[in-house]
């Protein structure tokens, strides 16, 4: 089977690029090669990530569509991902790679999208609107702003005491999952030569059928090594969204720490109920001796302990 040659366009740290690299190297995204990384900024840290993994990278000014197109053609690029690429893609590139360019947006489009909705502004808009959920959207790039066909969406809860920054961090973890799934879909469609990626015979026919990632929300109570180990194992599942109460420095890298102590049974119960936690795992014995199992079961919440 032929390889899908992918180009990733970046402007900054390249965390989404790293997620794609990891997924390709682990064959989560099969039959795919990151053939080129392009940055419009010389100091983008994502260039160092590419170098570390032996991936060819170039710096091309965002307005130089001719040079960009030449690079894409030279390296026989089949599809493109805009992974934190902070520039409007030239229409010439969009036309040459029609329906083969993916963008990731940190909200549930079509809400909180369009001109001016980027970075922290998106999350401020979500909080101002009072939305109960946010998330990430991977969509096909067209000549509009955030208007292309939606490929994949994944939701995260908006918590009671969220700030734009805490929400941004939670959404970012979902971006990795959504983007990985979207690249997998695009690669499969291009390799198979599916006609949905070309001009439609019927204008009403969808290019893709949107996929909604359904995350299992798991709360792990504790702050020790055992809780971190449990979280590490569970984090390997793309569909898992992890919360730790109170957690530690290690758990913050694989999920989200919640500032609730293990002996505060009332707040733990409220958090699990309000945020629709699917399963709670109790590490230390203290909350068990304080009756957390009985309290959770009264509210119809699933809970497991040693």
Image (spheres, helix red, strand yellow):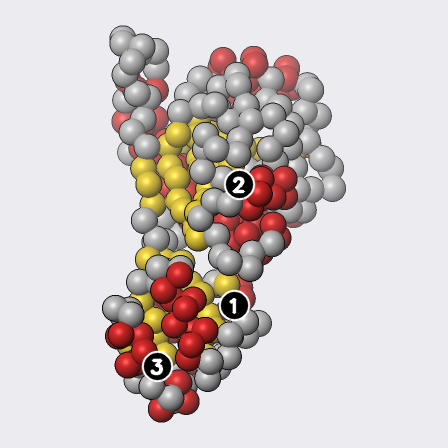
Q: What residue is pinned by disc 2?
A: 129
Task: Please tell me whether residue 215 is drawn above or below residue 80 in the rendered image.
Answer: below
Query: Looking at the rendering, in which quadrant would you find the C terminus?
Result: bottom left
SS class, disc 1:
strand
Position of residue 67 measured from the top left corner of the image (x, y, whole percent): 65, 19
Residue at 53% across, 31% down: 113
Task: Please tell me whether residue 241 is drawn above or below residue 230 in the rendered image.
Answer: above
Q: Which tag, 1 or 3, sits closer to the chain's start?
A: 1
Residue at 51% across, 74% down: 260
SS class, disc 3:
helix
Position of residue 87 measured from the top left corner of the image (x, y, whole percent): 64, 27
Residue at 33% across, 21% down: 207
Position of residue 206 measured from the top left corner of the image (x, y, whole percent): 30, 20
Give left or right: position of 66 versus 246. right
Q: In this figure, what is the number of numbered marks?
A: 3
Numbered tag placed on residue 286 in the rendering: none
Q: Is residue 46 visible?
A: no
- Label 3 CA crowd tier, 10 Å (few <14, some 14–19, many 20+): many
The nearer-to-camera label among 1 and 3 is: 3
Q: Which tag, 1 or 2, sits closer to the chain's start?
A: 2
Q: Nearer the viewer, residue 225 or 54?
A: 225
Give left or right: position of 281 versus 127. left
Q: What residue is pinned by disc 3?
A: 292
Q: What residue is pinned by disc 1?
A: 257
């Amino acid at each position: 089977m032929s390889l899908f040659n992918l180009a990733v366009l970046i402007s900054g740290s390249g965390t989404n690029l790293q997620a794609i690299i990891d997924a390709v190297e682990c064959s989560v995204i099969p039959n795919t090669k990151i053939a080129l990384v392009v940055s419009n900024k010389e100091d983008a840290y994502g260039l160092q990530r590419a170098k570390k993994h032996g991936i060819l990278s170039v710096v091309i000014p965002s307005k130089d569509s001719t040079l960009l197109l030449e690079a894409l053609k030279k390296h026989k690029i089949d599809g493109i991902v805009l992974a934190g690429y902070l520039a409007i893609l030239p229409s010439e590139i969009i036309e040459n790679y029609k329906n083969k360019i993916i963008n990731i947006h940190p909200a549930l489009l079509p809400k909180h999208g369009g001109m001016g909705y980027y970075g922290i502004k998106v999350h401020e808009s979500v909080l101002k609107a009072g939305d109960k959920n946010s998330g990430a959207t991977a969509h096909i790039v067209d000549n509009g702003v955030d208007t292309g066909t939606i490929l994949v969406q994944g939701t995260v809860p908006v918590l009671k005491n969220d700030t734009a920054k805490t929400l941004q961090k939670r959404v970012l973890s979902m971006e990795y999952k959504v983007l990985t799934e979207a690249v997998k879909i695009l690669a499969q469609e291009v390799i198979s030569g599916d006609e949905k990626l070309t001009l439609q015979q019927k204008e009403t026919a969808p290019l893709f059928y949107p996929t909604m990632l359904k995350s299992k929300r798991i709360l792990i109570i504790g702050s020790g090594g055992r809780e971190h180990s449990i979280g590490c194992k569970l984090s390997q599942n793309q569909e898992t969204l992890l919360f730790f109460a109170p957690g530690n420095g290690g758990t913050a890298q694989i999920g989200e720490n919640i500032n609730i102590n293990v002996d505060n049974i009332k707040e733990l119960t409220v958090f699990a109920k309000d945020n629709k936690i699917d399963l709670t795992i109790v590490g230390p014995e203290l909350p068990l001796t304080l009756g957390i199992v009985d309290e959770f079961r009264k509210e119809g919440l699933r809970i497991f302990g040693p």
